Image (spheres, rainbow, N blue to C red):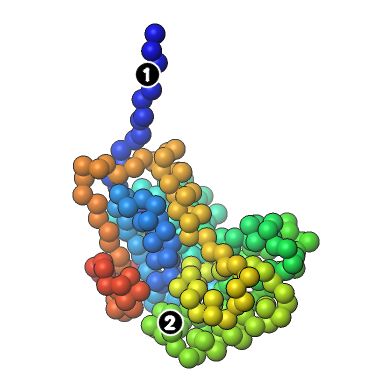
Amino acid sequence: MGSFFYIWFVINNQPIGLFDSGIGGSSIWAAIHELMPFESTIYLADSINAPYGEKSKDEIIALSTKNTDFLLNRNAKIIVVACNTATTNAIKELRNLYKHIPFIGIEPAIKPAALHSKTRSIGILATKGTLSSELFNKAVEIYHETKVIEQIGFGLVELIENGALNSNEMSKLLHSYLDPMVAANIDYLVLGCSHYPYLIPQIKKILPPHIKIIDSGQAVARQTQKILNEKIGFHSEDVKIETIFYTNSNTKVLSDILHNQYKIEYSAF
């Protein structure tokens, strides 16, 4: 007697919601959209409050709660916290406050860097809020046999948010942050802010070719897909998808970084 196998999955046409302290998390959105182009998405850029890395934990929790409410009011079925600082400082509180919806966070990818480093020296470029968080420091303690060169990326987020991605000032800052890491013999650089993947072309000009750069975009996309598959459901092929971007600041900066391919809506949330 023959066997029959059925492929079954839940249909859920609600959008994936993402938020960040600005435009940087659009790098996470891009990874999710590449993996699941059939999913509707809502992206929220809280650029007026960027960077979160200079704010207190309580302020970050309050902003993250406000952002979550914005996305839930637009029927998001899952929330991607596309911000390292918000993840390391607020995701525990968000999960306790909104128990009915899954949250996907983003953390610096210390584990793969530490496990694969041959020089036993890795660099972390991140915001002050991420590097000072309890979650980050617990991760570093696990790999205590690896030397971790921590560097706060002062000014980087502000330049990106102001459209100065390829400015001379950006180049000078990156050299000042990365040159000491090269001198410390790192062989992996971990990008601990969702804004920083947009700096990879410039970073590659500074780092020797043997130093590998790691960001978390693809890992976050895969985890989002996994949770949708196991708990939430995927968008139906028969229903039109929607891609919506909101910002509370200059719409042109976000539009430019997305190559003017999507409509950006201003919202004073």
Tell whether 129 sits left or right of 161: right
**Residue tagged by mark 1?**
4
Residue that appears at 21% across and 42% down: 238
Label 1 packing within 10 angstroms: few (<14), some (14-19), many (20+): few
Residue 179's mark? none
Indicate the secondary structure of the residue bearing disc 2.
loop
The mark that comes first in sequence, 2 or 1, is 1
Q: For residue 214, which quarter of the picture?
A: bottom right
Q: For residue 248, which quarter of the picture?
A: bottom left
Residue that appears at 73% across and 77% down: 184
Q: Position of residue 203 (x, y in %)?
A: 54, 77
Tell whether 61 sits left or right of 19: right
Specify the quadrant that holds the C terminus: bottom left
Q: Position of residue 34 (x, y in %)?
A: 37, 56
**Taking the image as drawn, is residue 202 in sight?**
yes
Q: Position of residue 4 (x, y in %)?
A: 37, 18
Residue that appears at 48% across and 56% down: 218
Indicate the secondary structure of the residue bearing disc 1.
loop
Tell whether 147 sits left or right of 70: right
Specify the amino acid type for callout 2: Leu
Number of on-image labels: 2
- Is 44 located above or below residue 75 in the figure? below
- Is 127 located above or below residue 222 in the figure? below
Q: Position of residue 18 (x, y in %)?
A: 39, 59
Q: Nearer the viewer, residue 201 or 41?
A: 201
**Residue tagged by mark 2?**
165
